[in-house]
Amino acid sequence: MSGRWIFLLILLWQPLAVFATDNTYLKELVGQARRENLAQRTEWLNLLHYKPYPFWPGMRSLADDPAFFNAPSGKTDAAAELDATLASFFSTVEESDKAQNPQCRFIARYHWLKEELHFDPARLPEQPCKRFYQWRASLDPYEITLVFPAAYLNNPASMYGHTLLRIDAKDQDEHTRLLAYSISYAAGTNETSGLIFAVRGLFGGYPGLFAITPYYLKVREYSDIENRDVWEYQLTLTPSEIDRLLMHTWELGPTHFDYYFFDENCAYHLLSLLEVARPGLELTDRFRWWAIPSDTVRAVTDQPGLLKRVVYRPATTTIIRRRLAEMDDRQSGLARDLAERKISASDDRLSELPPQEQARILELAYDYATYRSSTGHGMATAAQMHELLLARSRLEVPPQRPEVPMPAVRPDQGHKTSRLALGVGSRGGRQFEEIDLRPTYHDLMDDDGGYTRGAQIEFFNMRFRHYRGDDSLRLEEFTPLNIVSLSPRDDFFTPVSWKINIGWTRKHFSDDDEPLVFRANAGPGLAFNMPGSHEGHSVYYGFVEAALDVGKRFDQDYALGAGPTVGWLTDISDRWRINLYARSLRYGLGDAHNARDLTLEQRYSLNRQSALRLGLHRKQEFQDYWNAAEISLQYYY
């Protein structure tokens, strides 16, 4: 089709009644843009969110909202979208509460094209865009900070952690930072089931939307309610780069994207904003198949000159645990009784203590009562909180809030989230070689530096094995989903641990046949810190598990059972971890049989990105018993 006909279609696509188009000047601008090949410039492609798609020729936009495009083919044709966008800038629509002139609706595009094509204001008058500039003035932007709340297994959208951008005003400091605003991207859903969220999110089952909210609401959600440590990465964006970021955020306000759990998620799309802000950054290119929030933070910190400083904000529970570590059982018991309203602030056992000790107890009681209220574990009354504050105000001692040191390893400094393992071993006297591939993310035996201790999240693990003497490599195990939440309990915190594992594994039958069978097992559990151990460094635990195995080799094609698992997870040193556990399952429905497993796992870290693992096993399935052992070298990438 000739350029003249394309140009005519662009004009017809626009609402005719709102244009006073200088056709000659529009043709000049379109011609200049084509000569300079602006449609293929990185800046323009970033503004349109154009990315290469697997199995799709060329590039197309990730935006799924037709209103984001000015051309009918704008999603797949960047040149047509540029021509149509230029035409739209001649619109005479006046701004109102319900309508924007295209120069304002697509204000980042307008300013970039204006800079490249040097618009003549006499022939293309610039619109005032009062709504945008009033909004920008209310934000008073000075700096941009990338915020990373740590992983939280009980929120399906944040199992890997979460990221958002904070807009810091010039006159804000560490004490007033909560008054800032934040930019976030999330799925538009109230889904509370992690499994349902993950499954629907795999196929773009939710709309994804950008939102700007007061930062204190996010801090309350993450730090106070979900009790997640928050990391803040202050960036070195210049004023002009911040303006570009905010202009593009304004453009994206009403636009929806299909939300995908693994790739087009919160972390990925925030990187695209930074690419618009600072042309030349190539942050999203490395995340073709999946984007883990901690990996995207790593991508930002890896960029020379982009990171200014890092601030750590401990969660409410982290502060409470730090307070507890500095108290004896008598002091912590008084604080707990105060928070649970078992005693009053005038209790003699409290008043007879030195003022500084009283202050520590009252402050802990207040923090713990606030935590119980925010998490639904107990409702503190206004009278109770007033009593605690009044009692504390009568003590003429300074605040007793403890210093919580920044963890030695930040989230962006932990091991990388993909892992390849090469190993050898023996099973029932047969020797084998093994390859284990884990696309993402972390298990209980991995080094916890930069990760949430006790949180295992793995997706799409694959293990291949070759037995010596055999001609082929066989799939030993495929596990799309493997999650364990190991949360120690104490007198102050009483979480329930839980686990779920879904996939295919080899099942040993009495005739030595070992077919792949589908297996799903899950169950609740309890975990406790070993007395005298540092927080989470030595944990004993137990689960009550249900297990379903499905396959043609079973009588009635299935076996359903249940049983306990008990174990001990401990760190011998900073590099050496062991996990000793025993499991006994009785399959009583379908193909009745027993399955038992006694395992000792060990991991020794060579460095942050490599480790050795040793596994020793004593197993039973049906009436057969055997021993197994394997050693592997693991590489994180």
Image (cartoon, grey):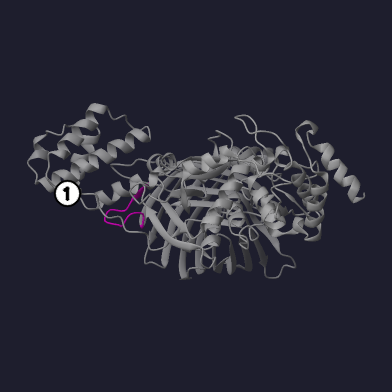
Nearest the viewer among 502 and 184 is: 184
Q: Position of residue 562 (x, y in %)?
A: 51, 40
Task: Relative to 267, say whether 632 is above or below.
Answer: below
Q: In the image as oriented, which residue stretches furthest toward the right? A: 1
Residue at the spot x=58%, y=65% of the render? 637
Q: Position of residue 399 (x, y in %)?
A: 20, 48
Nearest the viewer among 504 and 116 is: 116
**Drawn side of residue 146 relative to residue 280, left or right:** left
Nearest the viewer among 80 and 453 is: 80
Give the extent of the magenta segment.
Answer: 527-537
Q: Is residue 544 visible?
A: yes
State the SS at label 1.
loop
Q: In the image as oriented, which residue stretches furthest toward the left? A: 352
Amino acid type for the residue under numbered disc 1: Pro
Q: Position of residue 441 (x, y in %)?
A: 55, 56
Classify 10 Å Cα crowding around label 1: few (below 14), some (14-19), many (20 and above): few
> Would you say residue 447 sits in the magenta stretch?
no
Nearest the viewer among 321 and 625 is: 321
Q: Which residue is mark 1?
A: 398
Residue at the spot x=63%, y=66% of the render? 434
**Drawn side of residue 2 relative to residue 36, left or right:** right
Q: How would you classify the magenta stretch by its main secondary structure?
A: loop
Image quadrant of residue 73? Answer: top right
**Drawn side of residue 396 relative to residue 563, left or right:** left
Q: Position of residue 366 (x, y in %)?
A: 25, 38
